[in-house]
Image: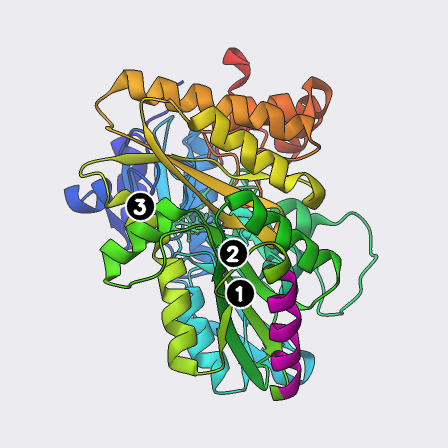
Amino acid sequence: MLRSAPQSLIDELSAALPGQVTQNETELNRHASDESFHKAIRPDAIVMARSTSDVQLVMRLCSAANVPVIPFGVGSSLEGQIIPVEGGITLDLSEMDKIVEICPDDLIVVVQPGLRRIPLNDRLAKEGLFFSVDPGADATLGGMASTGASGTTTVRYGSMRENVMALEAVLADGTVVRTGSRARKDSAGYDLTRLLVGSEGTLAVITELTLRVFGIPEAMSGAYCTFDRLSDGVAAATLLVKQGLPIARCEFLDGLSVKAINAYQGTSLTESPTLFLEFHGSKKSIADQADEAGEIFREYGASDFTWTADEGERRKLWQARHNAYPAVLATQVGATALTTDSAVPLSRLPEAVEYAQQVFDDQPFSWSVLGHVADGNFHALLMFDPNDEKAYLAAKAASTKLTTRVIELGGTCTGEHGIGLGKRDSLVNQVGSETIELMRSVKNTFDPGNILNPGKILFPKESA
Ligand SMILES: Cc1cc2nc3c(=O)[nH]c(=O)nc-3n(C[C@H](O)[C@H](O)[C@H](O)COP(=O)(O)OP(=O)(O)OC[C@H]3O[C@@H](n4cnc5c(N)ncnc54)[C@H](O)[C@@H]3O)c2cc1C
């Protein structure tokens, strides 16, 4: 159902927030799509929020006018989360980018939602601290909380779900609420913090986050090794986690992804299934951890396990891993990607990855697999020409087939990217209709007019 913003509402917003409302073509286009393959749709106008009271005002006016509001960080999400499918106003939080408070003794930082993770870490480094969650993109903390993001260090330090301690948020009617506390343990009532984390802008607009931070370890080292078969690398990494080795990062890439990285950034990595690792600790413990990991990997057929404590080499290695997504996309000019985000119990990971390879072989699209192996989470990038409907349908069918199997294995359709538009059918398969109805009643309690990012996570009622 289209609920476009009338010009009278846009004029009222412009008068109340001078210089903060735009209908500029370039800006409308920039806010029309995220990094996914989903079709772009432009909002009717964009409001740049600068304070919690700006957000309250937008919510009150849009609520009264029954016009959708789509919260926006930097638009790096991968499931169509920020696309205004019912029209409305995009509420851009990127100018609310201040660090409110750093509390080194409590290992806490309080930030506004539009702050990005790299500038946050640049500032925290001066205190000997870091914020651990690192999705590939330089996303905003508000966006990361809202998608329940995680990254390469989740195996050691947790995802946004573990690292957001408290929130300030504005409800659909403009009411400000606070959830959680600064305490490291908290059993006070319903856990609304974790309900808002991962809610993709459908329940409230986050206006402040209290985050857990960590001390920068004394020493870090990077390592990599290659395998003849992807499943051997996956099995070796799974054993590493089972043995309780405190690895900080453990990622795998198939041979095609490594080939793409070599072409993209001029490296000469061996073009075989590869594991990238990182160890954090004292100088002695990182050497011990690397030796132990090397032994396990050699048992699984790795021939070339190497590690380095050199900071430049370690950064180069991880730069290669972080460039995997654009590197794979660059292998096919004009292509877009449907990105799967399966996560399974650790013991089922080798089986799930092998199944994915069987499903994708012989398909009319090219693909590659990479993932956060120590979390049981892996992505397949299924590439197709956005104008080729047949290739898209083949990619969608293959992705659904994989997701069905992943759910049978006790896993989830999304470990970190969220549901958005792209995985609404998979969510129904995963949780069942009773749970979907419970989710609908939660949504209805927070947002009875359905104005906050409508059409995301849950299908609209009329098409359900
Ligand atoms: C190359 C690449 C690699 C990636 N790798 C990973 C990865 O490893 N792990 C991972 O988790 N993700 C990954 N992502 C996806 C993406 O970076 C995350 O989804 C990120 O968390 C989105 O943050 P954002 O600031 O871009 O939010 P946006 O895309 O702007 O918004 C995302 C969602 O959050 C909502 N939202 C934004 N701000 C607020 C707010 N203040 N209050 C309420 N709702 C809000 C929006 O409405 C939307 O539903 C990757 C993306 C790219 C392009």
Give the SS element for disc 3.
helix
Please give the residue where the numbered disc 2 appears in the rendered image: 251
Task: Identify the disc placed on residue 328.
Answer: 3
| Along the viewing direction, whichever of 61 and 382 lies nearer the viewer | 382
Q: Residue at x 21, y 40 (%)?
A: 29
Q: Position of residue 434 (x, y in %)?
A: 73, 20
User: Tag 1, which secondary structure?
Assistant: strand
**Image: magenta residue range:** 284-296
Image side of residue 444 versus residue 262, left or right = right
Q: How far separated are the C-alphas under marks 3 and 2?
A: 16 Å
Question: Which amino acid does the dot numbered 2 rest on?
Answer: Glu
Give the mark nearer the N terminus: 1 vs 3. 1
> Which of the marked residues, 3 or 2, is nearer the chain's N terminus?
2
Amino acid type indicated by mark 3: Val
Q: The C terminus lies in which quarter of the figure? A: top right
Q: CA distance from mark 1 to mark 2?
A: 6 Å
Q: Residue furthest left?
A: 25
Q: Tell which circle, 1 or 2, labels the residue nearer the N-terminal end.
A: 2
How crowded is the residue under tag 2: few (<14 C-alpha within 10 Å), some, or many (20+)?
many
- Relative to 187, 460 lies left or right: left
Task: Find disc 1 in the rendering and name its residue.
Answer: 277
